[in-house]
Image (cartoon, grey):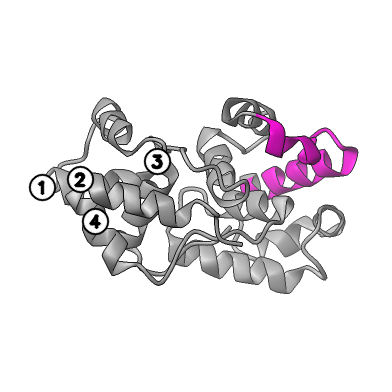
């Protein structure tokens, strides 16, 4: 599913920022998309923590191959050595099991998320082990398709802003936030285009 705001957001960014204008033109044939599965999105985000996109794709493919289905029940029924054999660290296995447990016992109120604010969703998700603010922000962008999320701690975003706006010098959080103010209310969309400038293959969670 593609966000219904995508064309409006892309046009607005292109009109107000020459870097964005070039990126919007370059990647006109692709957009942010979601698979819509909350558990899969969060599990994929945990797998991708602190490793490259390529490495995360490889580990994720092995996880999918090892499980009969991608569900909380299947993860909880899996043997730890099987999950470790997919390339997951012991800590990430613990995180996936904790996430699956939260889904199984209903402590994550998935049905309410579309009506909750970004801050409320982040607070609920970060109560799960292994889900920090960055992972919650990825969920907001890739699953709930929230249009105005700026993940200040995202390394890819920092690298892209350095490349396009600061002659390669990594911006501070304050400077990055200031850039974000220029992109409101479409900061998720700006972030997506900046990610694309580093890795033209769209990431889907």
Say which element carries label 2. helix
| Cβ–Cβ under 8 Å for marks 3 and 4 | no
Please state which of the two labelled residues, at mark 2 or mark 4, is closer to the viewer.
Answer: 4
For disc 3, the marked residue is: 187
Q: Which residues are magenta?
A: 92-116
Answer with mark 4 or mark 1, whichever residue precedes in sequence: 4
For the residues marked 2 and 1, what is the alpha-carbon distance in whole angstroms? 6 Å
Q: Position of residue 178 (x, y in %)?
A: 26, 29
Up/down of 49 relative to 149, above or below: below
For the residues marked 1 and 3, what is the alpha-carbon distance in whole angstroms? 21 Å
Q: Seen in the image, is 86 located left or right of residue 175?
A: right
Q: Position of residue 50 (x, y in %)?
A: 46, 48
For disc 4, the marked residue is: 21
Up/down of 127 relative to 195, above or below: above
Please state which of the two labelled residues, at mark 3 or mark 4, is closer to the viewer.
Answer: 4
For disc 1, the marked residue is: 167
* Tag of residue 4: none
The residue depicted at 42 percent of the width and 59 percent of the height is 52
Up/down of 191 relative to 137, above or below: below
């Amino acid at each position: 599913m593609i966000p219904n705001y995508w064309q409006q957001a892309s046009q607005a960014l292109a009109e107000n920022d020459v870097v964005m204008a070039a990126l919007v033109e370059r990647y006109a044939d692709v957009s942010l998309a979601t698979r819509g599965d909350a558990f899969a999105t969060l599990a994929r985000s945990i797998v991708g923590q602190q490793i490259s996109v390529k490495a995360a794709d490889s580990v994720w493919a092995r996880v999918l191959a090892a499980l009969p289905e991608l569900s909380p029940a299947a993860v909880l029924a899996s043997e730890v050595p099987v999950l470790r054999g997919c390339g997951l660290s012991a800590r990430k296995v613990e995180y996936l099991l904790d996430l699956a447990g939260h889904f199984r016992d209903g402590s994550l109120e998935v049905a309410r998320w579309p009506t909750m604010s970004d801050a409320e969703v982040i607070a609920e998700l970060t109560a799960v082990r292994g889900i920090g603010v960055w992972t919650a922000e990825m969920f907001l962008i890739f699953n709930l398709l929230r249009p105005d999320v700026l993940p200040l701690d995202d390394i890819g975003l920092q690298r892209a802003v350095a490349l396009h706006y600061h002659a390669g010098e990594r911006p501070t959080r304050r400077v990055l936030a200031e850039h974000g103010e220029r992109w409101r209310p479409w900061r998720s969309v700006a972030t997506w285009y900046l990610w694309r400038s580093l890795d033209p293959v769209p990431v889907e969670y």
